[in-house]
Amino acid sequence: MRDTGALARQVEEFMARHPGVSLAALGAGEHAGSLELSPFGVPATYLPAERNLALAQQYLALNQLAFGGIGVPRWVLSDLYLLPGAIGLLRCPARLVKPEVREALGLADEDPTIGAAYYAAPSVTPGLFIGVSLLSFLPGTGAAPWVKALTLGMLRARRLRGVAQWDNPSVRVHARLGPLRLVGRVPGGHEYGERTFVYETDLSDGVRVAEAMVRRLYRVPTQRVSVTDLSALSALLDRAEAGEVLHLVPPGVDAGHVLVSEG
């Protein structure tokens, strides 16, 4: 993601509002030199996973706390997260996170912990990353889109593809980085296939990302489709797979409807 003065100012303001929060990355030691460890001017600490086993275990526990039965297994964390890539972390004193996190991990108020985290997997297409896992336990901070943006900045991502469900509130978080171009259905299928789609975010225009992050990027939707109208939503994916350009425009979902811009 290209750096801009606007994004740098926004990140600086976010960090200033939340003293005690710091940026880090957890991954295989050899990846340290491949990351941008000052995304938008925020210094990031690289933590080799081989020497930070307790932190890797903490991330694993928090991922499973956030996602329950679909939380990442340990071998997936090692083989498919940490070996090929790096997880972006916002770390903080435990007093800042939700009480259930402190209880689950047995933390005292000043113990360091992971407040928010994002993982995007590298792909075979240069500059394209695949969004995998976003979690935040920092209530009232709006940390989720910021840990996502900062991680993608560390990765120097130019495009992001992800998977979402039409009726999931996370669509609003994803749209904080800009319009979501509809790509189509999930390759290989999905447990929630009838209400799931693949989207792509263009991260190459830092000015547009900055506008989206502060909710000033707006395009008038040409269609509003109910998140329960699976037939109409499936037809949108048919059109996208046929090559038509369709976007979900920020905030992505409003009052139970996805906001679609055609052309």
Image (spheres, helix red, strand yellow):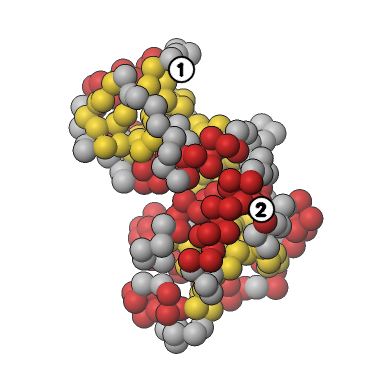
Locate residue 193: give its quadrant: top left
User: Which numbered disc flags the more N-terminal residue, 2 or 1?
Assistant: 2
Q: Secondary structure at mark 2?
A: helix
**What label sits on residue 142 in the rendered view?**
none
Image coordinates of residue 224 in percent, x first then y, are 26, 25
**Residue placed at 43% from the left, 39% from the top?**
216
Q: Which residue is mark 1?
A: 245
Quadrant location, the C terminus:
top left
**Residue placed at 68% from the left, 62% from the top?**
43
Instruction: Name the side, left or right, on which 191 lies relative to 72.
Output: left
Amino acid residing under circle 1: Val
Q: Residues within 10 Å of mark 1 (few under 14, many from 20)?
A: some
Rounded to the nearest whole Å, what is the CA distance between mark 2 and mark 1? 31 Å
Instruction: Name the side, left or right, on which 41 lies relative to 116.
Output: right
Q: Which residue is mark 2?
A: 39
Locate residue 128: give its quadrant: top right
Instruction: Name the side, left or right, on which 206 lies relative to 172.
Output: right
Image coordinates of residue 162 in percent, x first then y, are 48, 38
Image coordinates of residue 235 in percent, x first then y, are 31, 18
Q: Nearer the viewer, residue 165 or 172?
A: 172
Locate residue 219: give its quadrant: top left
Above or below, comparing residue 55 to residue 212 in the picture: below
Q: Is residue 229 visible?
A: yes
Q: Secondary structure at mark 1?
A: loop
Amino acid residing under circle 2: Pro
Q: Nearer the viewer, residue 72 or 154?
A: 154
Q: Is residue 83 visible?
A: no
Q: Nearer the viewer, residue 263 or 3?
A: 3
Q: Are marks 2 and 1 in contact (CB under 8 Å)?
A: no
Q: Residues within 10 Å of mark 2 (few under 14, many from 20)?
A: many
**Residue placed at 79% from the left, 55% from the top?**
33
